[in-house]
Amino acid sequence: MRKLAGVSISWADSYVGQLRAIAGDRTLMFVGARAVVRDNAGRILLIQRADNGRWAMPAGAMELGESIADCAVREVREETGLRALRVSAFALYTGPDRTHTNMYGHTYQIFTTAFRVEEWDGDLARITDETTDAAFFDRGHLPGPLSASVPETLADLDVFEQTNRLILK
């Protein structure tokens, strides 16, 4: 279940779910957000996804009626229970090389905006409708299996923080 403006919606009722029902097996554009949340010790928050067991950053698809920043804030809340108070974009991942077929056989060309969560509050929910665990990890000791997006996103965040230039891929 997803929550948009406080209302729970199923995947089938989500924008991407509705498009998939109409488009069938066609490749769809998938617009989404990914969030890097760090604690005061600089550890990275990862969630263990319920659908594939991989450790990843909070992320998901943008819904109609929200901005990409609102999407990042919502995904953090849905998948961790934390409230992202301030976010800033640092990377855009686009292009045909970002085409992916998921475990359900659905193919998407993914356009993802990565956000740094600069301020947050709340208590971490380790288990949600979309996760089986969540925790903060030292960068040198990340759990497995790890989503391929995690190392790339962290490396791009490092470059952004050194150059203050938006990463475009």
Image (tube, rainbow, N blue to C red):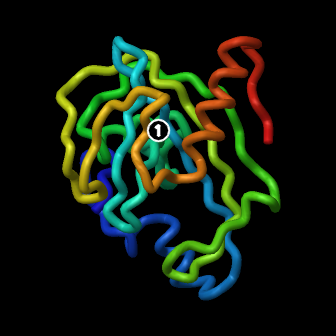
Left or right of residue 93: residue 18: left
Q: Is residue 22 above or below residue 43?
A: below
Left or right of residue 36: residue 131: left
Between 41 and 131, the one lying in front of the other is 41
At label 1, the amino acid type is: Ala
On-image quarter of the C terminus:
top right
Task: Give x and y (percent) for residue 77.
Answer: 30, 39
Left or right of residue 67: residue 135: left
Q: State the residue at coordinates (49%, 65%).
A: 15
Q: State the residue at coordinates (37%, 62%).
A: 53
Q: How many labels does the image show?
A: 1
Q: In this view, does 166 lie above or below 81?
A: above
Task: Give x and y (percent) for residue 72.
Answer: 47, 38
Q: State which quadrant residue 2 falls in.
A: bottom left
Q: Is mark 1 on a helix, strand or loop?
A: helix
Mark 1 surroundings: few (<14), some (14-19) or many (≥20) residues within 10 A? many
Q: State the residue at coordinates (52%, 34%).
A: 69
On-image quarter of the N terminus:
bottom left
Q: Which residue lies furthest to the front in this view?
A: 141
Task: Give x and y (percent) for residue 35.
Answer: 48, 35
Q: In this view, does 161 lie above or below 108?
A: above
Q: In this view, does 92 lie above or below 64?
A: above
Task: Give x and y (percent) for residue 21.
Answer: 51, 83
The residue tagged 1 is 72
Between 145 and 18, the one lying in front of the other is 145
Q: State which quadrant residue 39 falls in.
A: top left
Q: State the residue at coordinates (35%, 12%).
A: 40
